[in-house]
Image (spheres, rainbow, N blue to C red):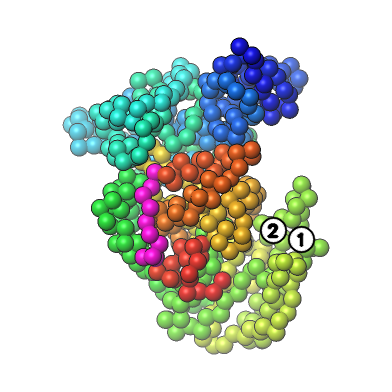
Amino acid sequence: MNKVEIVLANTGERMMVEPGTQVAQLAEEYVKQKTAADGKAPWPILGALVNNEVEPLHFRIYTPKVVKLLDIRDRQGFRMYRNALCLMLYKAVHDCYPTAHLSIDHSLQNGFYCRIEPTEEADSNESLADKMEVCRTVRERMIALQEQDLPFTSETLLMNDAIDLIRPREIDRTLYILEHLRQLYIEMNFLDDTVHKVNGKLAPSTGCITTWDFRTYEDGYLLLCADPEHPDKLSMFSDTPKLFAIFREHHKWVDLLHTPTVSDYNRIVHEGGGQQLILLAEALHEKKYAEIAEQVRQSGTRMVLLAGPSSSGKTTSCRRLSVQLSVLGYDVNQLSLDDYFLGRDRTPKLPNGEYDFESVDALDIPLLNEHLNALFRGEEVQIPTYDFIKGEPFYSGKTLKLGPQSILVVEGIHALNPKLTAEIDEGLKYKVYVSALTQLAIDDLNIIHGTDNRLVRRIVRDNNFRGWNAYQTIHRWPEVVRGERIHIFPYQENANVMFNSALLYELGVLKRYAEPLLKQVPEDCEEYSIAKQLLTFSELLLPIDDKFIPYNSIMREFLGGSTFEY
């Protein structure tokens, strides 16, 4: 047979290989060359982008391809590492405690918060009460699995065969999803005698998963991951009690609505409960806004600083909180930090020469502090308006003056950064942090990351209001995330209160808008792999009609039709 041409994107090299060559063979040769050139071995290759689709190392090549080898420092390589680590934990728990139930509830910084609990069938003499002992036992089993260097494998099965395979394994939520997927085949994942369905590709073996930790945390456990920028080190973890409290609240909400996972959500929608789910989720949001407004009143503050990452629903939260403050008798005045951007000639730049709009230094901090101090002295100030097309602020005659019953609500991604309002008395500030901390997991092993949730929101909003396609939004997203990691997340614990803007039903609504956009991302770019990943979990959800969504909902900020002006 004729040989197949391969382009190795890591080096730009073109090569001819035998049909059926595994990606692992390309990786082995690449590692040899890098080791010889650099004098040390590169980080382990975990998988590859093959024509911009994520594939494991055992993938075989039969037609011309562009191959980019991935290690943990790559966005998709890190996901493969995390997927493998979670399956390794799942096997360790069930090897040690066969009748226990593992639930990976949500991400927490660069790790996962987990629970290990007894099931109804638990042996009477088996105890999970001693969490330190459970943690030690599971960690030791994970270390043993790592040392065995067991392969992670996958097999494409007929859907009925996959269902029969997992039915006796008591992973009911996964089973429900598979039973309702309209697919003939599905890929299942294996680690020795353990089988599960992982939402994504996995690293090649347990021996590749060298940097991790498993420890007790609060009333559960914390699975810590490697730092993707420094793979030989654990990610830095700092205690975030306020953020964790929001996740505790999240558990109360999902228990109240009986929707902790996609299978529970799908069951409700399938039985006609979509409208009721929307009404209950929106009522919980309104209740929370009212509680925050009351806390603001009790604090005696004159200014609310409201911050959060991209697509967290800050603007709608600002409007709805303002309504609740008005109910309490305040004269509410709003100020957007977007109007305090510097002109383009003074905007900081990234190393690649592009403007760094995510930096707090992109704002005119001296002018903002001058205006705030003047307002609190009772003076009237002229407020700038920023022209994003020209990249310059201008004055349109808009003025602002605070009265005795006035409260100022300041909204923007940097509102909690102490540098922004360093000249303002701390006693005047009440700080609110808003973020979409996804409430819905796929099943007990696979979560939906909040970053992915916000990216789907932004794809829909950018298309509706900026005319951007999904490729453009995904392409810009890494810089957005980088800015959040540097400029927003370090200050979230400064908040007096946190608000989770995620809605249990939202991904079922957004999928109607996002899926056609994601399917238009061209295959000849790396953004295609992210689009495929987002489509993978979106396709698991049953859709909900957006006609039931109230006009003041956070969802209207992304879908359109809001009663608020943005």
Depicted 329 relative to depicted 362: above or below: below
Q: Which residue is mark 1?
A: 347
Q: Nearer the viewer, residue 486 or 566?
A: 566
Whether residue 517 is visible: yes
Q: Residue at position x 74%, y 76% from top?
A: 394
- Residue 534: which numbered mark, if any? none
Q: Position of residue 556 (x, y in %)?
A: 47, 66
So how many labels did they put on this image? 2
Are circles 2 and 1 on residues that touch, CB within 8 Å? yes
Q: Is residue 252 left or right of residue 123?
A: right
Q: Amino acid at mark 2?
A: Phe
- Tell which residue pokes out farthest to the top in this image: 1
Q: Residues within 10 Å of mark 1 (few under 14, many from 20)?
A: some
How packed mark 2 is, by other alpha carbons closer than 10 Å (few <14, some 14-19, many 20 or more), is some
Does dot 1 land on a helix, a strand or a loop? loop
Q: Relative to 32, does residue 540 appear above or below in the rendering?
A: below
Does residue 288 appear to the left or right of 19 in the view shown?
left
Viewport quadrant of the N terminus? top right
Q: Say whether disc 2 or disc 1 marks the residue closer to the N-terminus.
A: 1
Compared to residue 16, the image places residue 397 above or below, namely below
Say left or right for 455 vs 160: right
Magenta stretch bounds: 540-549
Q: Residue at x 51, y 70 (%)?
A: 318
Q: Secondary structure at mark 2?
A: loop
The answer to which image quadrant residue 195 occupies is top left
In the rendered image, residue 436 lying in the magenta stretch gets the answer no
Quote the CA–CA distance across marks 2 and 1: 7 Å
Chief secondary structure of the magenta portion: loop
Residue 481 position, x and y percent, is: 60, 49
Instruction: Tell me where residue 285 sits by quadrant.
Output: bottom left
Residue under numbered circle 2: 357
